[in-house]
Image: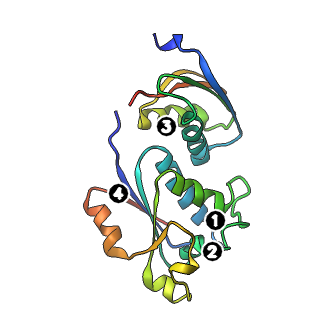
Amino acid sequence: MSEQKKLVVVNSRGFDDERSSVAWSIANTAAASDMDVTVFLVAAGVDWVRKGATEVARLNPLDPSIGDMVESFLGNGGRILVCPPCAKVRGYDEDSLIEGATIAGAPVMLEEIQAGGSALSF
Amino acid sequence: MKNETGIAHRWDAGETGCGHLAVGLKRELARLVPGQCLEVTARNEGAPVDVPAWCRVTGHDLLHAGHPKYVIQRKHQ
């Protein structure tokens, strides 16, 4: 039987890097496997939840669109944290981000690790 | 007893693989009530190992695996 395991996926890659799509793919798999998953977006990874950016972009033709991946992740109970200075330096505030993305920093993410979570970093 | 439930729903996953297959399995199983069975056709070459692994992690019963056909029984919770 499975107990709910915590996973943190740190994604620092933006739309110019296929690895960010892999990060979201793994986060989605974990959320679809009943794990308690937090995606922590830092640096260029913040663009994944910028309003308007998620509708059309697709990094790998075999992956769903960015919007679909984010929506599916949230729909399966995933949590999205956005590094505050990484958002601010890009001129983004909470209103610039899609519903479900929260501006919160490393302390919040580290709480998940302290509570027994594992971390994957991209 | 497990095999007497029949197939309540069928899903053709086509070539969907890796994490996207897992997302689809969760979505399609959510359409069933506990105890009902889903028949999945998954042609992706990772499916023979990915589908059983997903079932082990989530606790759903894999009743049949004969690539590309898989039968999964939604777990009782």
Chain bearing mark 1: A
Return the x and y of residue A17 as percentages of the image width and height: 63, 70
- Measure the C-alpha gap from mark 2 to mark 1: 20 Å
- The reply to whether the C-beta atoms of the residues labelled 4 and 1 are less than 8 Å apart is no
- Measure the C-alpha gap from mark 4 to mark 1: 23 Å
Count residues near mark 3 (Cα–Cα under 10 Å), then give few for <14, some for 14-19, many for 20+: many
Q: What residue type is labelled 4?
A: Ser
Q: Which amino acid does label 2 sit on?
A: Lys
Q: Mark 3 points at which residue?
A: B54
**Along the viewing direction, whichever of A39 and A95 lies nearer the viewer:** A95
Q: Name the residue under label 1.
A: A18
Which residue corresponds to the image point at 33% horizontal and 71% vertical from the top-left? A108
Q: Are marks 3 and 2 on the same chain?
A: no
Q: Is residue A70 above or below residue B51?
A: below
Q: Are marks 4 and 1 on the same chain?
A: yes
- Measure the C-alpha gap from mark 4 to mark 2: 29 Å
For the residues carrying marks 4 and 2, which lies nearer the camera in this image? Answer: 2
Left or right? Give the position of A11 relative to A111: right
The image quadrant that residue B56 belongs to is top left
For the residues carrying marks 2 and 1, which lies nearer the camera in this image? Answer: 2
On residue A118, the disc is 4
Return the x and y of residue B21 as percentages of the image width and height: 61, 42
Q: Which amino acid does label 3 sit on?
A: Trp
- The reply to whether the C-beta atoms of the residues labelled 2 and 1 are less than 8 Å apart is no
- Measure the C-alpha gap from mark 4 to mark 3: 18 Å
Q: Do labels 3 and 1 share a chain?
A: no
